[in-house]
């Protein structure tokens, strides 16, 4: 699951940085537990709704769905998930410059809850309005609640990695609750009951947050880089103007004043996001006054971003083509009980929880033996492993031509995808923090987050080739994705052999610069 962006890379340390008078819970700042519980309920609402999004859109009207074609539905899904990540950029900026993270979390949660309430209304127009509200609210809440966790610790506090590990565990628990509760309600009561459950989940998160916000202290209490009064007025004018524009476009579209083609929009957005990435990268590279070593680090950074984009374009098939395969072509009966389709989505977070300790120990084991694969090598390996999951799906799709297949195929696919995720995602975050020019670190992290949006857009376009009415074509779709992932992974792996030297040069240069400051 894409929330691995919150996962730390490192080993929990001792309690350095603990203030003698600090109130703690299990050795951690008092605010960690309530903010983690708040995030757990927010993730319950997000994944619970996301898991059934494509299923609801493609279901027949008689079954309570929207009867949208598969290609259009998965394009909408890709636009939705990409927008969630993209809106985190302005959401983080609003908190840093205008209102602070604590208020951003509160306001974002309220908007998310309202979005799910609107989704629960059995009306097509309400559905799209609800999606837009969830996107806006998540963009405001998600980056800032993660930032507050870090702000609970001082710079020298070695409990930080352990704190993020606890926080990440709550994220996975939230996703498990969401997929399980909302998936069951969707199968047994209908989609709008499931959307309503997501609203209840977010409401519970808001209650926890409101009751315990005092435990956060000064963490995220105000903007970290406040603007002048004139700057604030201008910024708020832009923010409200942007929201007004979104409202006008939405109302006009729903009123039929202009048509909206999700597939064409996905292609356009993919081009726009790619252009933004390339232009910003070029601006930093050519006009950022970088040293030769920093420029080599930027090329290594570019390789990581390519790998990340390609990885998420395949991994995010879980909510679209693989979700539809689980619904239409998988025998989900166990002991006479038919599992709701979205329960299969629980396989990924369960494997994450089970495998994370082994991966943490594996990297430590390699380090003790002075074996340190470069970031590019790890990225390439993660892509190849994820691609192998689609090789499994090629055989599953071929078997589906004869009838529904066993759950084993999807479980094995999700296992390989999870191994690829654990190999690539946390390592990519660590790489960005180490390879970026220090004075551009925040901007480079924002640029890296854009790879999630690009990957989700591409995922939606790829999944458009999934046609439940043409079973014989499914092996070709999964074969295409597998070839794409493994091919790009092999190239990244090979190029990574050359960039490893650059990575080491950058790390040494950054360490020397840090020592010089001291």
Image (cartoon, rainbow, N blue to C red):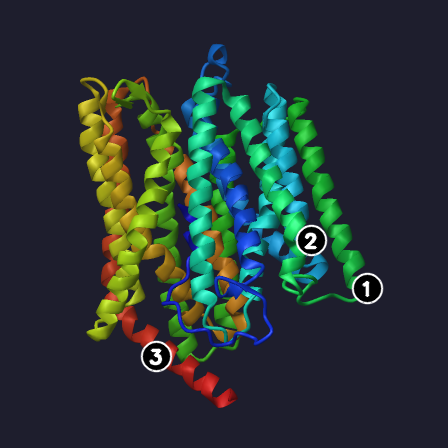
- Above or below for 463 versus 149: above
Residue drawn at x 21%, y 72% as measured from the top left: 371
Near-viewer residue (370 or 43) = 43
Of discs 1 and 2, which sits in the foreground?
2
Q: Secondary structure at mark 1?
A: helix
User: Can you see residue 488?
Assistant: no
- Compute the Cα span from label 2 to label 3: 41 Å
Q: Quadrant of residue 323?
A: top left
Near-viewer residue (499 or 446) = 446
Q: Position of residue 313 (x, y in %)?
A: 37, 44
Q: Position of residue 350 (x, y in %)?
A: 33, 43
User: Can you see residue 118?
Assistant: yes
Residue drawn at x 30%, y 69% as measured from the top left: 499
Of discs 1 and 3, which sits in the foreground?
1
Q: Are marks 1 and 3 in contact (CB under 8 Å)?
A: no
- 100 vs 200, left or right, is right
- Above or below for 281 versus 54: below
Q: What residue is shown with label 1?
A: 229
- Compute the Cα span from label 1 to label 2: 19 Å
- Above or below for 54 versus 509: above
Local crowd size for mark 3, using a 10 Å CA cut-off: few (<14), some (14–19), many (≥20): some
Local crowd size for mark 2, using a 10 Å CA cut-off: few (<14), some (14–19), many (≥20): some
Q: Position of residue 426 (x, y in %)?
A: 37, 58
- 478 vs 212, left or right, is left
């Amino acid at each position: 699951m894409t929330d691995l962006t919150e996962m730390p890379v490192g080993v929990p340390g001792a309690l350095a940085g603990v203030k003698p008078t600090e109130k703690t819970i299990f050795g951690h700042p008092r605010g960690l537990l309530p903010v983690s519980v708040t995030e757990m309920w927010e993730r319950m609402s997000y994944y619970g709704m996301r898991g059934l999004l494509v299923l609801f859109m493609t279901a027949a009207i008689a079954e309570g769905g929207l009867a949208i074609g598969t290609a259009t539905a998965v394009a909408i899904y890709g636009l939705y998930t990409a927008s969630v990540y993209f809106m985190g950029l302005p959401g983080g900026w609003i908190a840093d410059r205008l209102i602070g993270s604590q208020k951003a979390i509160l306001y974002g949660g309220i908007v998310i809850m309202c979005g799910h309430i609107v989704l629960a209304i059995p009306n097509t127009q309400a559905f799209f309005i609800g999606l837009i509200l969830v996107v806006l609210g998540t963009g405001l809440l998600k980056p800032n609640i993660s930032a507050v966790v870090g702000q609970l610790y001082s710079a020298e506090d070695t409990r930080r990695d352990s704190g993020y590990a606890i926080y990440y565990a709550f994220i996975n628990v939230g996703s498990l609750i969401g997929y399980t509760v909302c998936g069951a309600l969707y199968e047994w009561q209908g989609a709008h009951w499931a959307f309503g459950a997501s609203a209840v989940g977010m409401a519970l998160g808001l209650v926890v947050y409101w009751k315990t916000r005092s435990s956060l202290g000064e963490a995220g209490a105000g903007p970290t880089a406040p603007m002048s009064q004139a700057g604030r007025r201008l910024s708020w004018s832009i923010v409200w103007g942007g929201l007004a524009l979104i409202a006008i476009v939405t109302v006009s579209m729903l009123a039929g004043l202009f048509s909206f083609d999700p597939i064409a929009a996905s292609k356009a957005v993919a081009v726009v996001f790619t252009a933004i990435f390339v232009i910003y990268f070029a601006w930093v590279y050519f006009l950022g006054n970088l040293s030769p070593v920093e420029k080599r680090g930027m090329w290594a950074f570019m390789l990581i971003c390519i790998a990340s984009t390609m990885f998420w374009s395949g991994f995010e098939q879980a909510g679209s083509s693989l979700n539809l395969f689980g619904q239409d072509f998988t025998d989900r009966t166990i002991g006479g009980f038919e599992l709701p389709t979205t329960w299969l989505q629980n396989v990924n977070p369960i494997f994450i929880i089970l495998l994370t300790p082994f991966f943490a120990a594996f990297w430590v084991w390699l380090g003790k033996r002075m074996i340190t694969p470069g970031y590019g090598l790890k990225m390439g390996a993660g892509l190849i492993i994820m691609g192998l999951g689609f090789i499994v799906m090629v055989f599953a799709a071929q078997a589906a031509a004869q009838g529904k297949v066993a759950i084993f195929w999807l479980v094995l696919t999700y296992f390989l995808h999870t191994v690829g995720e654990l190999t690539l995602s946390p390592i990519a975050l660590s790489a960005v923090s180490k390879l970026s020019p220090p004075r551009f670190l925040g901007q480079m992290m924002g640029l890296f987050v854009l790879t999630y949006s690009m990957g989700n857009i591409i995922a939606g376009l790829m999944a458009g080739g999934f046609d439940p009415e043409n079973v014989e074509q499914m092996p070709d779709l999964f074969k295409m994705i597998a070839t794409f992932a493994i091919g790009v992974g092999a190239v990244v792996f090979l190029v990574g052999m050359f960039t490893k030297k650059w990575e080491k040069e950058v790390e040494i240069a950054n360490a020397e610069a840090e020592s010089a400051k001291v």
